[in-house]
Image: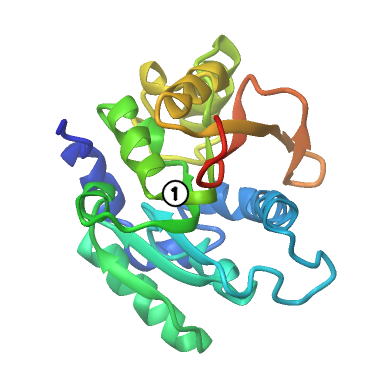
Amino acid sequence: MAETLDYDELEKFGDLGEAWWDPEGPMRPLHLLQPTRMAWIREQAVRHFGGDPKARRPLEGLRALDVGCGGGLSCEPLARLGARVVGIDPVRRNIEVAREHARGAGLSIDYRIATVEDLYVRHETFDLVLALEVVEHVPDPAEFLGEAAGLVAPGGMLILSTLSRTLRALLLGVVAAEFLLGWLPPGTHDWRRFLKPSEVAAMLRAHGLLAIATTGLVFDPAHERFERSRDLSVNYMLAAVRPPEGAKA
């Protein structure tokens, strides 16, 4: 089994501490992304699992996993949507922050200091697996995506978000975000690790998951928010499903 942890990357995120929940701090880009990102996740999951789109807790009964959960920014909305949530991160401080924040919010979330490999070797499976802004930080994305795919139960769904390996992503996602706007510390991203949607889909297909939907996420500077777009050349999200048992991929 190949190593899917980059310890230099872990050190970067391990220094964030309580800053995860500061909308004006170093995680500001994620806070700006979050409303549009979670709305798309909700929409895809409700459609795939047949939930009621008007319900307050449309993911009731689903077991969900957030891989690389950080301080829990996506785990908490998932829990409020009704899912039974497991959040994993290899950085102890991130999990401590996530647990403390969830307690303050009155939410029950199973946070674990763990990696995707840990759950994979224990043969755990989930209805919904999230890997948001994670794959671009691992040294072996094919191995990581294979193990993440292995955590998706038959009939389940995996949703990821990342950046595409394009010139626009280099200019906007690295040069502008890290050096011009100062949204992220320099060195947060290595453009060479970015994956195009077709590459992600092929890696997941090799492990039995079929890509069914994509959306781009583009920044609207006038309103300081991200919006959905057909443009997948910078930030994008991809949803893939594992066919039910007995169904052909």
Label 1 sits on a secondary structure element that is: strand
2 w.r.t. 152: above or below: above
Question: For this view, does 150 lie left or right of residue 128?
Answer: left
* Residue 182 percent coordinates (x, y): 50, 38
> Mark 1 Cα within 10 Å, few/some/many (few <14, many 20+)?
many
Q: Could you tell me residue 50's position as x and y percent?
A: 74, 59
Circle 1 is placed at which residue position? Answer: 152
**Where, quadrant-wise, is the C terminus in this rendering?**
top right
For this rendering, which residue is in front, 139 or 189? 139
Looking at the picture, how far across and down is residue 49, in whole percent?
A: 67, 57
Q: Could you tell me which quadrant the N terminus lies in? A: top left
Q: Residue furthest right?
A: 54
Would residue 2 appear left or right of 178 to someone viewing this image?
Answer: left
**Could you tell me the amino acid type at mark 1?**
Val
**205 or 166, nearer to the observer:** 205
Image position of 72 (left or right of 113): right
Residue 219 relative to residue 142: left or right: right
Q: Can the viewer see residue 191?
A: yes
| Residue 113 falls in image quadrant | bottom left
Residue at position x 25%, y 28% from top? 139
Q: Depth check: 71 or 120 in front?
A: 120
